[in-house]
Image (tube, rainbow, N blue to C red):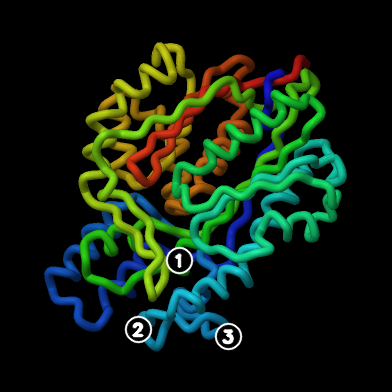
Amino acid sequence: MTARIVSIGTALPDTRVTQSALRDLFAAQPGFDRKSQRLVGAAFDAAAIDTRHTVLPQLAGTAVDGLPVRDGDTLLMPPTGARNDEYRRTAPTLFAEASRAALAGSGYRADAVTHVVTVSCTGMFAPGPDYHLVRDLDLSPTVERYHLGFIGCAAAVPALRLAARIVGDDPTAVVLVACTELCSLHWQTSSHTDQIVAASVFADGAGAAIVASADASHDGLDLDGFATHVLDDGEEDMAWTVGDSGFEMTLTPEVPRIIGREIAAIAADVLGDLADIDAWAVHPGGRSILDRVENALDLDPSALVPSREVLRQYGNMSSATLLFILRDLLADSARAEGDQVAALAFGPGLTVEAARITVRRPAA
């Protein structure tokens, strides 16, 4: 039985900040010499991002109660526990908002959901987001719940793969997949290149999808197949660890180069003839990653416009980002029945996650 994404919902924190404002704030940190300030300017300006959303209004200069992250123009470094407390306070609302939007577009009632798969790598607590969705959405207390944590930017693909396997085993299953990432909680005020790059791209957001058996009366995205591939290089180049002052991201300049070097062979292996692909959903880990993928796969510049547009408007929201791209492809009237979509995402390891997807439109 083919599993289908029948709807996708997204949610964003209320606070929206321009890339230029974040650049100027980060460059103004005490102890940043001229070289560091130049690196900040170069990284932020090259990111191809206009705006990002955050659960921290203080980053936009709004004085509110909550996690203290700013004193004037100085960014503070709260301990990990305080950052995680803010995640626990704010993440459930975004999980629920995106999930309600997905349900609203699906044609299913909340009590039809049989399984919940939640995804996040920017906070942790128990009972966790999966439990809160049962309460917040008034789901059945017998719903099966799964949580995928610390898989990073690639995690939406394994979450959809799990949903597809659940539906394949039980055609009556209705699976809610929900991803929420609050990357801004872990901003590090360091002049180290890795932290500057991370600060220049990561943002907050949530995405959710309803996955169920294919139904000819409802358009959607059929989940035809999945693949995963661990690269020989990159274990130390993309990493995510828990430190005393938040979760610390390692993202070296080698990441785009490794992806660019390896992606052509991997894509051909897991996706087949790339000439058959009509649309691409590539996780925008950063502009340079998209550039390397485009060049390595010899894609027309228009192919990655959906990924670049999501990056421009929202930044890199880690696992939630791919659902924003798939949402836009599903809503795009230019995408016709039978169009083939290739999804690619990259996570710590380095790990490449891929999915083969078919656009389905109901007969008029």
**Rounded to the nearest whole Å, what is the CA distance between mark 3 and mark 1?**
16 Å
Q: Nearer the viewer, residue 236 or 331?
A: 236
Left/right placement of residue 321 relative to residue 130 reads left
Q: Nearer the viewer, residue 262 or 206?
A: 262
Disc on the earlier residue, 1 or 2: 2
Outermost bottom residue: 71
Disc on the earlier residue, 2 or 3: 3
Q: Secondary structure at mark 3?
A: loop
Disc 3: which residue: 65
Confirm whether residue 133 shows in the render: yes
Disc 2: which residue: 73
**Rounded to the nearest whole Å, what is the CA distance between mark 2 and mark 3?**
17 Å
Rendered location of residue 100, percent (x, y): 75, 51
Disc on the earlier residue, 3 or 1: 3
Q: Nearer the viewer, residue 163 or 259?
A: 163
Q: In the rendered image, which quarter contains the C terminus?
A: top right
